[in-house]
Image: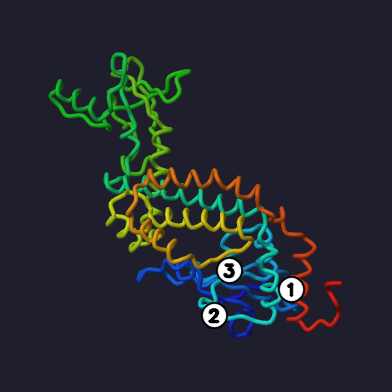
């Protein structure tokens, strides 16, 4: 497969459309907002024959993404919200256009179908989940989430319950002259007892290394030594902690610091940008059902409300209730809508061929 770069697309003039999308297109831009460029390009005919299709080209951060025409129309047929928005980009956001693009733009409304009920609502629900996920990570950060080790999930059976290994060692040392730690004890397996071990006062160590171990270790115990206690290792809880910690570290590395500062400033402990997009997507979905059209740039009145959500002027639970009510109402709106069930496959393919014919200079008629 031939690898294209953004410079390749520009130097060879393969881009047939590009626009500034995201908050600039919606009307919700802030001074700290990134500039997202989205576009469509057409792969040279000889490259398709020699190397096969290339689907898209992007920069490292995906701030700039260009979709090859075939990929773009495929996603368009699926009513992918991000792709549909490109087709309806506001005039003042368009950077490049072409005669080939005019063919597709002239029939843009034919690509709005009943599928928007599911795709736009699905994206909205996903934004709600992301906002909730952010809330959890904010709580992790506030509680100073730290990496725990195997020993933090080890417990000693104590009467009818358990005591953490740390507390048990403290209590054990209170009754002894010498001080003991995990290296002074060894474990042996117990038949038919998963993750439960006999613990002996015998040097060896419950773990090989307190900083790097991912499990307890077993030792060969000399005959005649009786168990000092019985220990259980909550391996499932340890695995969950490791997963959550890794996810948290990834979030710390990839998060947008300006976005984090804004979310902290309004103090509502949810990602207000995700919630803003939830309402925008739901409003757009309703508009498509009612009018058969899509306005990427929202009205001044709606932008005012969206920006209030963005700045955390509403409570999370209130926003969630309203969003859930809008999702319920979508079914009624689309049941009344005259939108087609789907994009006709032959029609979409014909448009694709008509655009390629114009670009490649083919003379034969593609559409009867």
State the separation of the CA atoms marked 3 and 2: 12 Å
Looking at marks 3 and 2 on the same chain, the residue that comes earlier in the sequence is marked by 3
Residue under the image location 60 percent in, 49 percent down: 333
State the separation of the CA atoms marked 1 and 3: 24 Å
Q: Secondary structure at mark 2?
A: strand
Residue 8 in view of the camera: no
Q: Secondary structure at mark 1?
A: helix
Residue 157 drawn at (x, y percent): 32, 19
Q: How many marks?
A: 3
Within 10 Å of disc 3 (Cα), the crowding (few <14, some 14-19, many 20+) is many
Q: Secondary structure at mark 3?
A: helix
Residue 241 drawn at (x, y percent): 38, 40
Q: Is residue 86 above or below residue 8?
A: above
Q: Is residue 212 above or below residue 169?
A: below
Residue 122 drawn at (x, y percent): 56, 50
Screen quadrant of the C terminus:
bottom right
Residue pointed to by mark 1? 48
Left or right, 206 with respect to 366, comes to: left
Residue under the image location 71 percent in, 76 percent down: 103
Residue 110 in view of the camera: yes
Q: Which mark is residue 19?
A: none
Within 10 Å of disc 1 (Cα), the crowding (few <14, some 14-19, many 20+) is few
Which is more toward the observer, 35 or 161? Answer: 35
Q: Is residue 7 above or below residue 86?
A: below
Quarter residue 38 falls in: bottom right
Looking at marks 2 and 1 on the same chain, the residue that comes earlier in the sequence is marked by 1
Looking at marks 1 and 3 on the same chain, the residue that comes earlier in the sequence is marked by 1
Residue pointed to by mark 3? 86
Within 10 Å of disc 2 (Cα), the crowding (few <14, some 14-19, many 20+) is few
2 or 1: mark nearer the eye:
2
Residue pointed to by mark 2? 95
């Amino acid at each position: 497969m031939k690898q294209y770069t953004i410079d390749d697309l520009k130097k060879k003039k393969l881009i047939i459309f590009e626009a500034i999308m995201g908050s600039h297109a919606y009307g919700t831009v802030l001074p700290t907002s990134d500039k997202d460029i989205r576009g469509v390009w057409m792969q040279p005919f000889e490259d398709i024959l020699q190397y096969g299709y290339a689907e898209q080209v992007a920069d490292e951060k995906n701030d700039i993404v260009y979709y090859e025409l075939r990929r773009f129309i495929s996603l368009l047929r699926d009513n992918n919200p991000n792709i549909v928005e490109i087709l309806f980009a506001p005039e003042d956001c368009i950077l490049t256009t072409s005669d080939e693009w005019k063919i597709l733009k002239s029939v843009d409304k034919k690509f709005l179908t009943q599928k928007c009920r599911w795709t736009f609502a699905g994206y909205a629900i996903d934004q709600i989940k992301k906002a909730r996920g952010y809330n959890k990570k904010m709580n992790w950060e506030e509680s100073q989430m730290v990496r725990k080790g195997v020993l933090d999930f080890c417990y000693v059976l104590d009467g009818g319950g358990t005591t953490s290994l740390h507390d048990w060692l403290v209590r054990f040392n209170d009754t002894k002259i010498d001080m003991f730690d995990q290296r002074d004890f060894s474990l042996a397996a117990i038949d038919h007892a998963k993750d439960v071990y006999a613990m002996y006062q015998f040097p060896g160590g419950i773990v090989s290394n307190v900083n790097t171990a991912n499990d307890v270790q077993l030792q060969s115990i000399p005959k005649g030594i009786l168990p000092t206690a019985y220990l259980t290792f909550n391996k499932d809880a340890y695995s969950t902690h490791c997963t959550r910690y890794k996810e948290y570290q990834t979030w710390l590395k990839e998060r947008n610091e300006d976005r984090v500062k804004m979310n902290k400033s309004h103090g509502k402990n949810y990602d207000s940008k995700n919630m803003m997009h939830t309402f925008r997507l739901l409003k757009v979905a309703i508009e498509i059902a009612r009018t058969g059209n899509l306005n990427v740039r929202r009205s001044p009145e709606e932008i005012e409300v969206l920006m209030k959500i963005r700045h955390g002027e509403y409570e999370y639970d209130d926003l969630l209730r309203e969003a859930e009510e809008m999702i319920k109402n979508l079914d009624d709106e689309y049941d009344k809508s005259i939108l087609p069930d789907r994009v006709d496959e032959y029609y979409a393919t014909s448009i694709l061929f008509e655009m390629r014919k114009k670009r490649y200079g083919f003379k034969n008629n593609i559409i009867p």
